[in-house]
Amino acid sequence: MKELVNGGKWLDQDGNLIHAHGGHILFYNDYYYWYGEDRRDNYYVSCYRSKDLFTWEFRNHILTTDSPTSGMRIRTKLKLKREDGGKVNLERPKVLFNEKMKQFVLWVHFENGENYKDAACAIATSDTPDGDFTYHGHFNPLGYMSRDCTLYQDDDGTAYFISAARDNADLHIYRLQDDYLNIEKLVTQLWQGEYREAPAVIKEENVYYMCNSFCTGWAPNQGKFGFAKNMGGPWSVLEGFGDETTYSSQPAFILKTQDGQLFYFGDRWDAKDYFNSSYVVLPLEISNHKMAINYYEKAVLTDSGKIKFTNE
Ligand code: GAL
């Protein structure tokens, strides 16, 4: 039976460890595409795909130190390496398909590789979901600091970029232009002074839910969520979900499967050895303005093709 053991070693179909941390899954043309951080060698972001969420095919290192670069109409810095040749940091990559431009647009958190003082976002694009992405550089959205981030695409195609601002004290929701290549507007500033990061958004029955973590670096903490009828708010005050360490995980993204199941995906970071970091997947329950996760040791794919969670 195919299974995903929480905190275990998740392998691709060739038996290699999956490197897709702080990631995101996009469904496109019959496949789930999983994008995430891959800090090995000269890689930044890798892409895998699957039809059933259990068998993963490695597709490409879509962003590396040697990716093609191209400036944009907004002023960006096209730096994919430091002056000394070392790597910069590209964290929490998220990818959406832009219907208007017929291209895949990636937004990611950029840092210079030495400290976290740039607090910027960066953009890259590709005509295919797993092609070599062209890097368009980094910038500070409307001049703000921007760290942990996510993207959310609404039913009508409107997309939002959400990121931690003011040294992580506040969370900002920005609406993107219709080509997804720039910020259109800061729509709201949330939970000021509460230091929320690792945001992930889902909409259920016309209500938006956003989960996030507190700001404790690689160490897990109590996950919280808020909800709103509009992205621009008003958003509810934060309430806890999961246990005091969110079952030893930090939110990466929320996936709604093709048959409507909701899954919480988190990173179980290893603070001592980043490359030993693993993943957690749990069923996510949303009802009556509450978001909940309960712990199971693993997800299994049953013979009938259903995904079940179990401790056996
Ligand atoms: C976490 C953040 C991660 C990474 C890490 C570095 O708080 O969620 O994406 O930036 O800090 O310490």
Image (cartoon, helix red, strand yellow):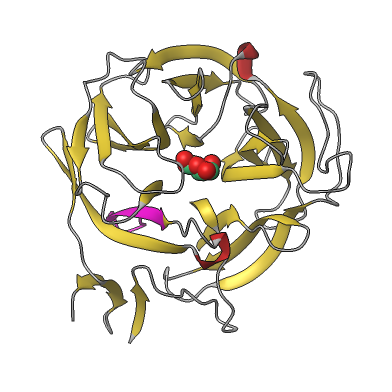
Q: Nearer the viewer, residue 48 or 64?
A: 64
Q: Nearer the viewer, residue 97 or 214?
A: 214
* In-image side of 246 versus 71 (left or right): left
Where, quadrant-wise, is the N terminus in this rendering? bottom left
| Residue 266 belongs to magenta span | yes
Residue 17 in picture, x, y percent from top left = 56, 74
Residue 15 in picture, x, y percent from top left = 56, 84
Magenta: predominant secondary structure element? strand
Task: Evaluate whether residue 175 shows in this view.
Answer: yes
Up/down of 49 relative to 125, above or below = below
Residue located farthest toward the front when viewing the structure as drawn: 272
Residue 9 in picture, x, y percent from top left = 45, 75
* In-image side of 165 versus 178 (left or right): left
Up/down of 72 relative to 288, above or below = above
Q: Which stretch did the figure color magenta?
A: 254-267
Q: Nearer the viewer, residue 160 or 103?
A: 160
Residue at 46 percent across and 35 percent down: it is 152
| Residue 217 belongs to magenta span | no
The number of discs equals 0
Res. 16 image quadrant: bottom right
